[in-house]
Image (tube, coloured by chain):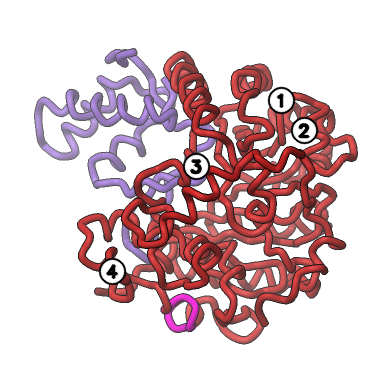
Chain colours: A purple, B red
Amino acid sequence: MEIQDTAKPRLAGKARLKWDATREKNLLLFPEGVLILNPTAHAVLALCDGERDITGISKILGEQYQTEGIQKDVKEILQRLVEKRLVEV
Amino acid sequence: METPRPFSLLCELTYRCPLQCPYCSNPLDFARHTTELTTEEWKRVLTEAAMLGVVQSHFSGGEPLVRKDVVEIIGHAHEQGLYTNLSTGGTLLNEKLAEQLRAAGLDSLQVSIQDSDAVNSDRLAGGAPSFEKKIHAARIAKEAGFPLTLNFVLHRQNIEHIGAIIALAEELGAERLELANTQFNGWALKNRMVLLPSRTQIEAAAEIVHAAQKRLKGRMEILHVLPDYFEQFPKPCLYGWGRVFMTVAADGFVLPCQTAREIRGMKFANVREGSLEEIWFRSEAFCKFRGTDWLPEPCQSCPRKETDFGGCRCQAFLLTGDATATDPVCSLSPRHEVIARALAEAGSAGSEQMIYRNPGESLKNLAANI
């Protein structure tokens, strides 16, 4: 199932974001697993509060990073995490 | 290369357990290790682990819920910023305890069940009724709001029920289902004749699991761990010895792997004698097989050496007598014939008699270490 621009993503109950001070990386933790997040993925996930939709998240990031056309990347990142059931829409 | 820091700590809070599963991963001589770490010692271990770089903590046993301080210990792990998993047999879980665990910050709960068939599940767990309590525990965990994982260890005595096992997990609303075939170390190796499935059984089960994975995609994650006896190459033992994982056993010994105590002659350090950091970076056991420099041939010149790290050290020791040997499940191992022989013998005992994991049976085994 492809996620829509109007979807309002939030982290799954089992997943937690964590700043790893030892490795200086942002992590996504879940049962028996760890994802080391790149800065973009972390920025996207930090905005997933179940209130903002994908268009809204992309707009904020576009302004923050002064780039256009970021929505496609945002959707790709979220699509992968939805498939892993770490993000719910 | 710089030594990596561990991501994951397994805390085997106790070796005590009301169940007696014949494939238990605890050491054969578990009943000789009765001096459990205290609450304060576990808290110190968890504080040190977080400082060392651990981000995942996993609490198991034995049965971790036999400890009265389990909520306090998990609460402390949570306060250190660790993700917390609890793996229980379920028979001691009740509503109040589930709520206390939730309030303490437990992130994820796993209940192990021996089979979808109640009679067989009880038989595999040692005889006393436990199946109904496990089902009840799974429901309690769901009601308390936990993401529920169900664990089934697969073997000759339950693998043909795989369809019913998946259906049971669906009915109980599990988020995750772990279908791990038995790893034949320790107790499972003792019972291998009765537990090792046939290739036909493995293939039939794999087909059912694949179909279910497809059907349940996005609803229930199914992790299927195949038995390495049927594979061409070994499992990547721990994703590298002393690289990602560490285990602290009930009595405080720090193990690179929960079954490492099977390796006779290997010396382990204890958290009562040193910090977790010293033990991780400098103890004999952790340094012994770290990296790939120690690998024998044919591993040393093998293009897969960074993929599977020579396979499982415990299995190499148990099946060849030499912990530095290539894991004999590898088709390139000079000792691979021991696997073929085991496969040929499996199921030929003509009996379903198993040696159960209990203190009486345990004490028949000589102390392996320390």
Which x, y percent locates residue B8?
A: 49, 58
Earlier residue among tags 4 and 1: 1
Q: Is residue B78 left or right of residue B65?
A: left
Instruction: Give the crowd class for mark 4: few <14, some 14-19, many >=20 residues within 10 Å.
Output: some
- Mark 4 and mark 1 in contact? Answer it, CB < 8 Å: no
- Pointer 4 residue: B297
- Kind of residue indicated by mark 2: Ser
Type of amino acid under label 4: Glu
In space, the residues marked 2 and 3 are separated at their CA atoms by 21 Å
Same subunit: marks 3 and 4: yes
* Residues indicated by labels 2 and 3 sit on the same polypeptide chain: yes
Looking at the rendered structure, the kind of residue marked 3 is: Pro
Q: Nearer the viewer, mark 4 or mark 1?
A: 4
Same chain under badges 4 and 1? The reply is yes
Answer with the quarter of the image where residue A4 lies.
top left
Q: CA distance from mark 3 to mark 4?
A: 24 Å
For marks 2 and 3, give the one nearer the viewer: 3
Q: Is residue A29 left or right of residue B159?
A: left
**At 45% across and 60% down in the image, what residue appears?**
B312
The residue that label 3 is drawn on is B227
B77 in relation to A28, above or below: below
Residue B150 seen: yes
Do marks 2 and 1 both belong to one polypeptide chain? yes
- x and y percentages locating residue B89 in the rendered image: 75, 43
Question: What residue span does the magenta drawing correspond to?
Answer: B281-287
CB under 8 Å between discs 2 and 1: yes
**Residues tagged by mark 4 and mark 2 found on one chain of the structure:** yes
Q: Chain ID for label 4?
A: B
Q: Locate residue B232: give its quadrant.
A: top left
